[in-house]
Image (cartoon, grey):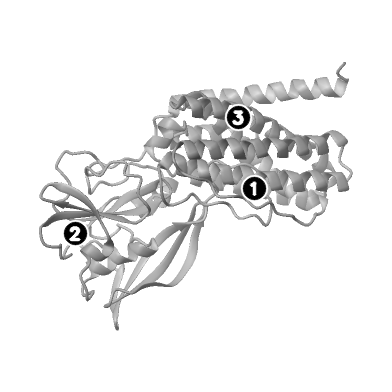
Amino acid sequence: MKTLNDTVRANRLDVFRHTLRSIALASAAASGLGVAGWSGCAATSSQSGNQRERAMSVNCGAIELTGLPLPPGVQGLVAYAWGPSGSFPAYFAGEFCIEGGHPDCGVGDAGFDRDEVFVRRAGIIERVSFADVVTLPVTSPAQATLLALTVDYHINCAGDPKVGVSPNGVRHVAGGFEVLGTRWAGCLDLLRGTVFVSEAGEVRILEEHLVEEYACPVSGRMTQGTAAPARPAGGNDVGRYFVQVAGLEAAAVDAFERMAAELQVLGAPVELVQWARASAEDERRHTRDMGALAERFAVKPAVHEAQQFALRGLFEVALENAVEGCVRETYGAVVGHHQARHAQDPVVRAGMARVAEDETRHAALSWAVAEWSLPQLTDAQRDVIRGAQRAAISALTRSVSIPEAHVLLRDAGLPAPGAALAMLQALGEQVWA
């Protein structure tokens, strides 16, 4: 027979689950908003709003590289760079794109690595290496700009698109050129730096610094000292996505194991400790399931090495729980419910239905831990935690404004930016208020 506490907790979980499901369902009306597309080879981003414009400024359209010498018989070229949504057309030269043709200029979903070049020769599209299309010595800004892609750097398209560089995008220096650009790294970190391209074709990064740090759009619980797993560069977009999710689930195992140990030492109720341990077991199963989905889409996940972490005090535990659980994991649970409903791939849909239920319980645990821990803190400590939560919500708002590849919206059921922003707004009104 259930105790009164068990009954109360079950009823509260039902209400919480209903709230998150309702938010995911209501977001469907906005699911077609904010999807960036390419309207021909020199298209610009269709995003709007200051945050989205800033976030997408490095992905705003393929730029014509004027003055780039083309190999004999080559009619045109398109070079792809890597961004948050996978590879995208960054530069083109000559007559590559067919007027009124497919937005990807005929390349299609080739499942290629982050830096690729395609040429059109006698009407046939061929994949070639950078060495095949850049003749040495490097004597033009266009050549240097193209070679900077080999270290993932591409220039902003804020300048004259016919020049192909922003006013200060490429500098002629002794022995070669310096290319000022940006690249994505880590989970979704935007870096700006300077790349040196020598006349002999040597490419190296001279300096770089972090411009924006975005939270992973779909994330479980991370713990301090854990690096967010990056999405791999090569392979199918859906497979690459599930490799990253499997890595996040594996990291969540460590986080819940640490949480259970810390709660026990801090004298938390036994049911919270047991709930955290059960959550770690859920995450182990998620790691296997998401890894299987990645392999279904022909991308093999990396093996995660479990980590051991030092135990912390009540304030540090409450702070991490407030950000990772009450904000990020709660949002992730809503996304899971959205995927369980909207993924067109039936295997993904079934898998995400199970994950969404588990993640909802994990988010509910976070709120239960907050309810236990926050009254024990000082007013100043609670103010710090509220500020950290506001910052985490702002980071999520920036990250979800970066659109994912269309195939991920379709097959994996990820929300488009409009739907994701609607979720965040509803969470702000109904859960985070």
SS of the residue under disc 3: helix
Residue at which label 3 appears: 356
SS of the residue under disc 1: helix
Q: Are marks 1 and 2 in contact (CB under 8 Å)?
A: no
Q: How many marks?
A: 3
* Residue type indicated by callout 1: Ala
* Residue type indicated by callout 3: Ala
Packing grade of label 3 (10 A; few <14, some 14-19, many >=20) is many
384 sits left or right of 74 in the view: right
First-in-chain label (3 vs 1): 1
User: Which disc is residue 431 wearing?
Assistant: none
305 sits left or right of 235 in the view: right
Residue 398, image x, y percentages: 49, 46
First-in-chain label (1 vs 2): 2
Residue 19, image x, y percentages: 63, 24
- The quarter in which the C terminus is drawn is top right
Which residue lies at the image location 35% right of the left edge and 45% below the top edge?
111
Which of the 4 image quadrants contains residue 38? Answer: top left
First-in-chain label (3 vs 2): 2
Residue situated furthest top in the rendering: 1
| 329 in relation to 395, above or below | above
Residue at which label 1 appears: 251
